[in-house]
Structure formats: C-alpha cells, structure tokens
Image: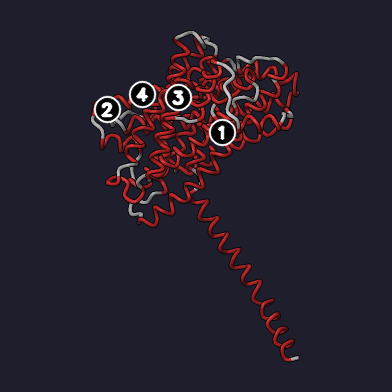
Amino acid sequence: MKNQEDSLEIALESSVIYPVDVKEINNKLLNRFKSLLKFLGPAFVVSVAYVDPGNFATNISGGSIFNYNLIWVILWSNIMAIFLQIMSAKLGIATGSNLTEMCRKIFSKKINWFFWVVAELAAIATTMAEFIGGALGLYLLFRIPLPLAGLLIGIITFGITYLQKYGQRVIEIIITVLVAVISISYAVELVLAKPDWTQVGIHTLIPSLPNGNAVLIAAGMLGATVMPHVIYLHSELVQSRNGKKASLEDKKKHLKMEKIDVAIAMNIAFIVNAAMVVVSASVFHSQGLIVDSIEQAHKSLEPLLGSLSSFAFGMALLASGLSSSTVGAMAGETVMDGFVDIKLPANIKRLITMTPAMLILIIGINPMKALVLSQVCLSFALPMAIIPMLIITSRKNLMGIFVNKTWVKVLGILITTIIVSLNIMLLYLTFTGSV
C-alpha cells in the first residue's frame, strides 16, 4: 500500500513538472529559431544567381532536346555550388574581408588585373542574361517591346539597389519575395505538366550524355548553376553580420548558421532548376518539340497546358530577371572595388555591365542563343574565382582555425578539375564542329 502511495505521489509530481519542461523546450526552440533568423539572408540573395534567366535558357534547351537525361547535371552542379558558397562565406567570416579584397592583398598587381578582366567579362555575361530575361518577361506578359522592356528592367534594378541605403536586410527581403514568386510559379508548372516521376528519379541519380551536343548544354547548365560573380559576392554579404570585434566563438556560430542558410536557399534553387528541366521534358520533348527560344516556350505552354501555365512562366521569368539583375549589380560593385580598387560612382559601374545587354536587345540577336552562350562564358570564368579562393582558404596564416582541412582541399581540387575538364571538352567539340 505504501509503495502504491509513493508511486501515485511521484506520478502527480511528474504531471506538475512535465508542462514546465515542455515550456522550457519550446522557449529554447523559439530562441534558436530567432537566432537563425538573424543570420538567414545572404545565401538567399546568392541563390538568385542560380535561378536567373540563363537557367531558363539552358534548362529549357536541355529538357526539350534531351528529355530528362541532364537532370543529374543540375544535382551535381548544385552540390558543387553549396560547397563553393560555404567556402566563400567562410573566407568572409574568417578574414573580415571579401574574396576580391583578399586577392588584392596576397597576389601581384598583374594577376589582380587579370582576375579583374575575367570577372568583369563574367559580370557582363551575367548581366546580359539577367536583363534579356527580365525584358522577355515583360514582353511576354505585357507585350512591351524588348528595348523598352530592357530599359524598364534597368530602372527598376536601379530602384531596388538604391534601397541598399536603408540596409542590406531590405534587399534580402525583396530578393526572398522574388525567389518565392519563382518557386510558386514553377510549383504550378509542375502540377500542370504531370511528369514521369520514375524517369525523373532515374536521371537525377544516373549520369548520361546522349551525344556531343549534350556537352554544350551541360556546360551551359554548369555555367548557369555555379556562378562566379556570387562566389565573390557571398564573402561580401556575410560582412553585415560579421562584427568588427567578433570573437572566435562568434565567428564559429556565424559560420554554422550560414551553412544552414546556404543549405536552405541552395536546395530551393535546386528544386526550381530541376523543375525547369522536368517541365520542359514532360511538355516539349514528349510532343517532339525542340524549343530554341523563350518566346516559343511561352507560346507552346498555353495550348499544351493552358493560360495559367504560360502566365506562371512569364511571372517566373520576370521575377528572375528583376532579382538577378539586382544581385548582378551588387556583385559588379564588389568585383570593381576589390581587385584593383577602382573608385567609380555605383551608377557608372552598373552602366558598364548593362550596355552589352541593351545592345543585344536593340540589334535583335536571338535572345535564347545569347543566353545559352553567356552561360558557357560563365563556366569558363569559374576557375578564375575558385582557384584563388582555394589558395586563400588553404593558408593558415590568413584563415586561422578556419583553414581548409585536407579533405576540403582535395574536394576543391576535384571540383575545379571537373569544371576545367568539361570546358576543355566543350572547346574541343566546338572547334572540331562536333557541336
């Protein structure tokens, strides 16, 4: 009897204590979530470059010509992108400087001028894709002529970047909203397209290159997915949360939170990119349509899937153009300020990279071809961003305890080798007339 009374008393005490424990757990989880929210943002800005109009061009081409065969390129490009963006963020957190500034500190003037020229050409190619894509979005939705649409995209981009004066967080919120528009639009497309999910799964996991032409599209996908300009930019964006007097523990926490930021943002980008290929394969390739222009893709969607699909496509393209042109402008400033310390007004810097895109629109070159070729150019510029980043992050005197471990160095070298090898193969096939 005594034992039963003791058991009852313990049970009653537990019932009183238990709700308090739950409350404490909830409070801890809430505090952790609030702490994470403070750090979320930079990777979402960076992720825009991975769902820019260049991705539309290469992914639509890849899906319509090669069905689901190239989805694996998106997966592996995204894995490489996550690795590289974390490394860029780590460099910024550990050193308190961005990648271009660190290059200026440790490399010779000649090497920095070379890096700067390559980075500027990459920025021009990037901006070309962004402005053409945004202008096409306005044209497809509202039938605004391309030159005027390009001018409007430029004005809106200036407006968004001007808001930086109110803090980086404002830009991060705007970009996140635009990424949400792109994601929702392609969620609608996926529902309407009804793809063969078994084939999607197989070609996501099993690599294949059907022919030589697939290498050109694969290189374009790589160039569209892993972007050199945001490797520079990410190391700059983390500085807003990297206090001047940050302790070692603060920096460790910052890096941990930034890894979560990257994981969330980049996997959203992967899903959107994969959705582009899947929709193109299930809608266009299944009908025997080879789509060689974004306008054709927009027109073809309506009779095949209905007006909601073509509207969603136009909205995704417009949101992509606006957000990525803003990020491109921010990256351009980082590149120009860092390598060679050129001091020009921000508006002049943006104009330098915007002009080629405007010329493309005015001359009337096929925007789809211009977009694909711009992405191939970016894949060639990638090693010039990755190699110096690997060198800097492997130096203990610069990185301290954040220096690359042996396995990180090996993985970085492997990724760089894959990118360079793919580009050499592309160059060979192009000059021998195989593509």
Residue at 33% x, 26% y: name it. 116
Horizontal and vertical percent position of residue 137: 60, 23
Q: How far is disc 1 from disc 4 in space, using C-alphas?
A: 27 Å
Dot 4 alpha-carbon crowd within 10 angstroms: few under 14, some 14 to 19, many 20 or more: some
Side of 98 where 16 appears, left or right: right
Label 3 sits on residue: 379
Q: Nearer the viewer, mark 1 or mark 4?
A: 1
Query: Disc 4 to disc 2, how far (Cα)?
Result: 11 Å
Q: Amino acid at mark 1?
A: Leu
Sequence-first disc among 3 and 2: 2
Which quadrant of the structure image shows residue 351?
top left
Judging by the rendered image, the residue that carries numbered circle 1 is 75
For the image, the number of numbered tags is 4
Vertical placement of residue 391 versus 155, above or below: below
Give the residue number, with chain letter if any, for mark 2.
111
Instruction: Compare marks 2 and 1 and give the one earlier in the sequence.
Output: 1
Name the residue type under label 4: Val
What amino acid is labelled 3 in the image? Answer: Ser
Report, in whole angstroms, how far the alpha carbon at label 4 lies from the one at label 3: 12 Å
Q: Position of residue 216 (x, y in %)?
A: 52, 18
- Callout 1 crowding tier (Cα within 10 Å): few <14, some 14–19, many ≥20: some
Q: Nearer the viewer, mark 4 or mark 3?
A: 3
**Quadrant housing residue 60:** top right
Seen in the picture, residue 236 relative to 355 is either above or below; the reply is below
| Residue 28 in the image, given as x and y percentages of width and height | 56, 63
The amino acid beneath tag 2 is Ile
CA gap, disc 3 and disc 2: 20 Å
Q: Residue at x 43, y 49 (%)?
A: 255
Which of disc 3 and disc 4 is earlier in sequence? 4
User: Which residue corresponds to the image point at 53% horizontal and 55% vertical from the top-left?
Assistant: 34
* Tag 1 near tag 4, CB within 8 Å: no
